[in-house]
Amino acid sequence: MNVERLRKIISYSESDREEIDSKVKRFCSFAGIEYDSDLLNILQIVRSSFQKKGYLVFEIPFADNEIGALCYRGDGLGYVVLNTSLPKVNVNFAIAHEIYHVFFGSEEFVSKVEFVDDHYYEHEGEYAANLFAGMLLMPEVSFRRMYSKFKDESEEDEIGAIVRLMSYYQVPYMAVLIRCLELGLIEGNAKLDVMFSIDRAQVKKQLTELWLDESIMEPSLRDDYIHIEALVGRFGREFIEDKYINERTVSKALKNMREIYAKIKGE
């Protein structure tokens, strides 16, 4: 990541933090979760909230491993599709990123959420969604406390602290490093260039050496499509019987889903 991009990230965080924080609070209220508490299973927490907004959430291994998630709104249903070709930490961040778009955005989009290389905050329009995700998944009070704890356990080694934080919050290394900078926990550090140059293999090696779960760096390859199509078909039949919708609408929704699935899988 170049210095200019980093400056833009921190500048955006400083100028828009209060607005994004208010949106985090609004989402937490909607989802029935306590603001500023750690989310141990983000997908489990948000799935019902997405459903209330008219979106189904499912996981599919994408052919394109640079896309973290895809959000699409059709005629009747919306879909948030998570890319399980990416490591678990990236998928978790992608979920939180899409929460922002579903609850506070207005456009159809494809979100790139890859944090081990230079693509973090690649597009200016994504700044808000990424800041929201970081604030939601790494609440400030908790994050400051755990940073202090893990830095002490790492004998003041900040890279070790960042890897421990990554494991604890189940988020990408780069997202943790950016959060540290946003909160002013790392300032004027001579090792900053080294921290930004850490690659995936080095992060995984650190996890192993610290006896942490290195599987968070691996893709799950989970594929929910069959279950989702069955679910939509079942609800569609019920709605047809109750005369809420007609058969043509259900067939169109299923056709759209199949087309999206084929495109995502690269078929």
Image: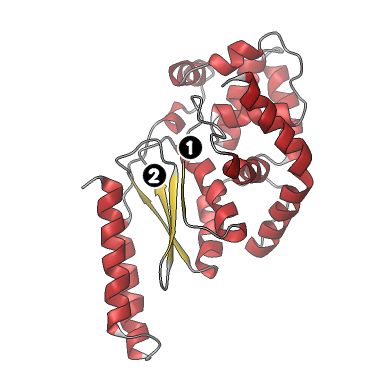
Residue 78 figure quarter: bottom left
Q: Residues within 10 Å of mark 1 (few under 14, many from 20)?
A: many
Left or right for 106, reference 182: left
Q: Quadrant of the N terminus?
A: top right
Disc 2 is placed on an element classified as strand
In the figure, 148 relative to 96: above or below? Answer: above
Residue drawn 50% across and 15% down? 209
Residue drawn 50% across and 59% down? 47
Q: How far from the left and from the top, in percent, is residue 2?
A: 59, 20
**Which of 107 and 115 lies nearest the eye of the viewer?**
107
Q: Which residue is mark 1?
A: 90
Disc 1 is placed on an element classified as helix
Residue type at tag 2: Asn
Residue type at tag 1: Asn
Asked if disc 2 and disc 1 are in contact, CB closer than 8 Å, the reply is yes
Residue drawn 70% across and 54% down? 23
Q: How far from the left and from the top, in percent, is residue 230?
A: 29, 68
Q: Which residue is mark 2?
A: 83
**Which of 109 and 217 lies nearest the eye of the viewer?**
109
